[in-house]
Amino acid sequence: MKVGGEKSKVLEWSEEVRKAVAVEKEAYWDWKQDQESEAKWEAVRQAKKVRKATVQRHKRQVDQKIVSRIETLHSKDPKEYWKQLKALDPMQHTSKKLPDTMMNDAKEMVCGQKEVEEVWAKCFEKLGREECEVGAFEEEFAERVRESVRRKAGDVDRKDDLLGLLDRPIQREEIDRAINKMRRGKAVGIDDYMNEIFMYGGEKVVEATWKLCHKVFQDEKYPKDWARGLIFPLFKGGAEEWRHNPLKYRGITLSVLGIMCLC
């Protein structure tokens, strides 16, 4: 049942809601048999008011259950915490579920989980590769980057300043700036750490992050997970059948927050 318009979230009916809807329908069809009756039309209006009030009461009860669950999850499971929190959003979000069938390099549709995963793996292997033949690599943009690097490398004064800046130890102010640039409500990576942990974790969290990044820089070693990322396919838009073509997706990589602070 949709509440509050076309874009509202869908609620599962409770027994109380079902009864209120049934009473409203019965009153409506009773009035349809005798549309001249003011009493029967008033019965329809009253039944509609009762149904609306019942739905709103049910919605508040559902939201309260979600809030109660969130309160127990806040410090235990950040991923589930945000999932439950977003369930309170009154707007119905478009499903981002990926298709169960995808088209492989041979233009054949595959449906098994292993086969579909192989399609995605092969597709994302081509991202950013110059030898890619599907137009996913922007040679013009790459040349601008190369030219910028050559220009900066040729500037002796700037080169010396740049090397000095890059070789100095990680400063606490740099970590502060990195955390201040973070935004709320962003998706988490494989570490399951959300930005809000760093944004609102307090002085000790910032201090620990700085010490970790400083040690990584000094030792020139970093956790293995920092080299990994979660690639999420984002549909570029277009015809519905394009959803089964992996080349119609943009790969968004979700990195761990540690490497984001360091970089």
Image (cartoon, grey):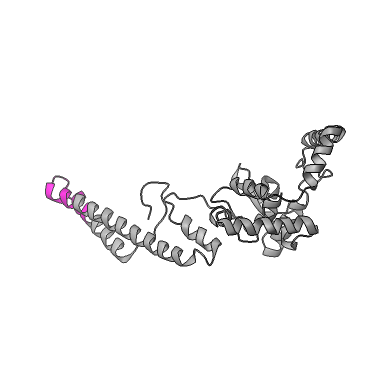
Magenta-drawn stretch contains 35: yes
Residue 163 location in percent, x, y? Answer: 82, 42
Pick whichever, 218 or 125, lies toward us: 218
Q: Residue at x 76, y 47 (%)?
A: 127
Q: Residue at x 71, y 56 (%)?
A: 213
Magenta-drawn stretch contains 143: no
In the image, is 16 to the left or to the right of 82? Answer: left
Pick whichever, 92 or 230, lies toward us: 230
To which quarter of the image does residue 97 belong? bottom right
Q: Which is the main secondary structure of the residues drawn in magenta?
A: helix
Pick whichever, 145 or 93, lies toward us: 145
Pick whichever, 190 or 56, lies toward us: 190
Q: Which residues are magenta?
A: 27-43
Residue 193 location in percent, x, y? Answer: 60, 59
Q: How many marks?
A: 0
The reply to whether residue 192 is visible in this rendering is yes
Q: Residue at x 67, y 64 (%)?
A: 113
**Is 196 rendered above or below residue 114?**
above
Residue 151 location in percent, x, y? Answer: 84, 32
